[in-house]
Image: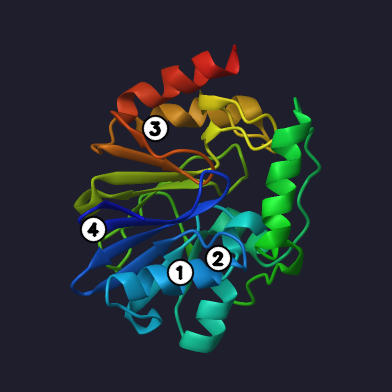
Amino acid sequence: MRLGPNLHRIGNDIVAAYLVVTPDGITVVDAGLPGHWNDLTEELTSIDRSVDDIRGVVLTHGDSDHVGFAERLRRDHGVPVYVHAADADRAKGGDKPKTPMGPMRLGATLGFFTYALRKKGFRTEYLTEVVEVADGDVLDLPGAPRVIGLPGHSPGSIAVHVPLAEAVFVGDALTTRHVLTGHAGMQPAPFTDEPDLALQSLDRLAAVDALWVLPGHGTPWQGSPADVAAAVRAGART
């Protein structure tokens, strides 16, 4: 799905990943689930590009529904995969703390897990090699993505700011569609390690200049990142 001249989304409101498309190549932000590989290749074909145009994958964090096809790109096509140092072990399949599931609605929860199964979420292939990044890094990739540390959902959760695409990719720092309840709107994401820290971290988005705020789960949101923290906190109270 084309969102803008340099910006595409694959997947849907349940699980999504993004492409930053430039004449010099493509940066992938998050890698969804393994079955999103077909979505990736179909989207590339639709814009007359190929996997060979991908220069790097940037992960907003190391959870299984974001590492998806990343190792396949790395292993089979030599594409480097970037992740915050604090989530490097997580992206390689290391231990993840148990977090409360919180509120659920049967239909939404079944829809999430059914979709994950359909997209081969039970076949997670974790990374064997990563390139570690840190807060403030500007990566030598198409669109010059800048790393913004947003710890809370996981220790190494980040936002990825790409001025060329007028976008900031926030992973699970927030959601616009709760995968377990189906509730729409800006709100905290489930399965968060440290919910209070995650809310505090959102204040770091206030100075970001972007038109798109793009979560890993939910509808792309158009608005000022300066309004994000207040909107998510309001959503946490509903």
Where residue 100 sits, quadrant-wise, is top right
Q: Please give the label number shown on residue 88.
A: none
Residues tagged 4 and 3 counted as in contact (Cβ below 8 A): no
| Amino acid type of the residue that numbered disc 1 sits on in the rendered structure | Leu
Where residue 116 sits, quadrant-wise, is bottom right
| Amino acid type of the residue that numbered disc 2 sits on in the rendered structure | His
Q: Sequence-wise, which precedes: disc 3 or disc 2?
A: 2
Classify 201 as above or below 21.
Answer: above
The quarter of the picture where the C terminus appears is top right
Q: CA distance from mark 2 to mark 1?
A: 6 Å
Q: CA distance from mark 4 to mark 3?
A: 24 Å
Q: Sequence-wise, which precedes: disc 1 or disc 3?
A: 1
| Amino acid type of the residue that numbered disc 3 sits on in the rendered structure | Arg
Q: Please give the label number shown on residue 204.
A: 3
* Horizontal and vertical percent position of residue 196: 62, 24
Residues tagged 2 and 1 counted as in contact (Cβ below 8 A): yes
Q: Please give the label number shown on residue 40.
A: 1
Q: Sequence-wise, which precedes: disc 4 or disc 3?
A: 4
Which type of secondary structure does the marked residue at label 3 adopt?
helix
Q: Sequence-wise, which precedes: disc 2 or disc 4?
A: 4
Left or right, 5 with reference to 218: left
Q: Please give the label number shown on residue 36.
A: 2
Q: Nearer the viewer, mark 1 or mark 3?
A: 1
Which type of secondary structure does the marked residue at label 2 adopt?
helix
- From the viewer's side, name the closer residue of 221 and 182: 182
Residues tagged 1 and 3 counted as in contact (Cβ below 8 A): no
| Amino acid type of the residue that numbered disc 4 sits on in the rendered structure | Asn
**Which residue is labeled 4 in the image?**
6
Is residue 9 in sight in this rendering?
yes
Residue at position x 70%, y 43% from top? 111
